[in-house]
Structures are given as C-alpha cells and as structure tokens.
Amino acid sequence: MIIREYEDRDSLGWVRCRVLSFLDTAYFDNVLREKEKYNNPSVELVAEIDNKIVGLIDVEYEVEKGTVCYYTDELGAVIWHLAVLPEYRNRGIATQLLNRAIEILKEKDIKRIEAWTRDDKWVNDWYLSRGFRLKEEYLHVYGDRKECNEIASPKIKDLSICNFFAHYLGENKDEIKNKFKRVHECRMYELIL
C-alpha cells in the first residue's frame, strides 16, 4: 500500500472510494459527485493498492485562527473526509492516513484537529481509540412530506415541501428523536496535537 498526496488524476477514484465507503454509514445519502476544493490550505492524501484508491483523508487547516474550525483558541484543522472502502477496512489504512496527516499538520504548527461524524458506533469508537475526545453534539433531523407539514408551510403558492434536513441544537433531544423517523447524533471530536 502507498499513502501519497492526492493528485487531480485521482478524482474519479476519490469519488468512488468516498461514495462506496459511506454507503453503510449514517452518511449514506451524503453523496458527492466531485471532490471538494478548499478555501484554505489542506492535507489531501489517498491510500492506493494496485493503482486503486482504497482510502482517503482530506483535512483543511488554518493559517489564521477561526477561518476553518469551530473552536478558535488555537490554530486548528478539520477532517472533512475520511474513508476506506469496505473490503479494505480493518487493515489500519484509516489510521495510517490519519497519522500521516498529523505529521504534516504538526509541521504546519497546527495544534488541534476537529472531526465531525454521526452516530455510527464503530466510527465513534475509532475516533475515541485514537485519542480524540467528544467536544460537542447536536442532532441532524431529516423529514419526509408528512413531517414537513408539521414544521413548515411554503410561502409560494402551489409549492410543496417534500423533504427537509435540519440541525436541532436544543435540550429536548428525546422529543425530537421520538417525533421524526430519521434523526442522527452529530458529534464533534477534538484531538490535541
């Protein structure tokens, strides 16, 4: 296996890896059709086996506090994408990608990393086992047509709201979880470097 910097020629392999890697997670419908570009500097690595992209990590980092991270007390970075194809999991690929990204970030004087994820136990356990600590959480709430009618009405005649995605930041999480069919805990982890 080779861990190397992402190159433009990796675009299709990167998208395939991310899509297939997310299908069995709570982010199954967060489909990207092309790789994101970042406003700030970034560490973009891929894991390659036999000319196939089997893993990836994208970490955008700050050169000025508060330009990328939620918390702004130190220069930080955010992991936007971390994925390993299902058939290549449990081989240490994600850990190797993270460790290499950390080496690069330390050279840039980055002091902390934020990682946002949902409520897949195995993903949360992975972050915790690598020294990340839970810093904050809120809910991602999805609604269908019936649920849309309970919370909103369109302001344009003959326009119907069929689905929604919302953030719930309040204290009554159980009430929201009982009211809507699809609700995920969104958790922010932090790793101090």
Image (spheres, rainbow, N blue to C red):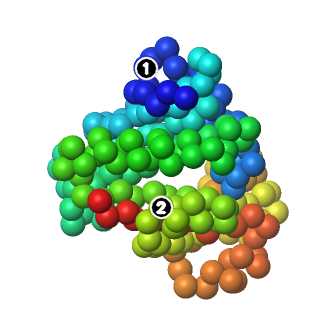
**Chain-order first, disc 1 or disc 2:** 1
The picture quadrant where one finds residue 173 is bottom right
159 or 116: nearer the viewer? 116
Disc 1 target residue: 7
Label 2 SS: loop
Q: CA distance from mark 1 to mark 2?
A: 27 Å
Task: Specify the label residue 42 is tagged with.
Answer: none
Rendering coords of residue 113 (x, y %): 35, 57
85 or 139: nearer the viewer? 85
Label 1 SS: loop
Residue at the image point whose x is 57% and y is 35% from the top: 55
The total of numbered circles placed on residues is 2
Vertical placement of 150 versus 178: above or below?
above
Q: Can see residue 134?
A: yes
Locate residue 160 relative to residue 191 in the image: left or right: right
Residue at the image point whose x is 21% and y is 62% from the top: 74
Rendering coords of residue 116 (x, y %): 49, 58
- Residue flagged by tag 2: what amino acid is it? Arg
Residue at the image point whose x is 50% and y is 27% from the top: 2
Q: Residue furthest right?
A: 146
The picture quadrant where one finds residue 192 is bottom left
Disc 2 target residue: 130
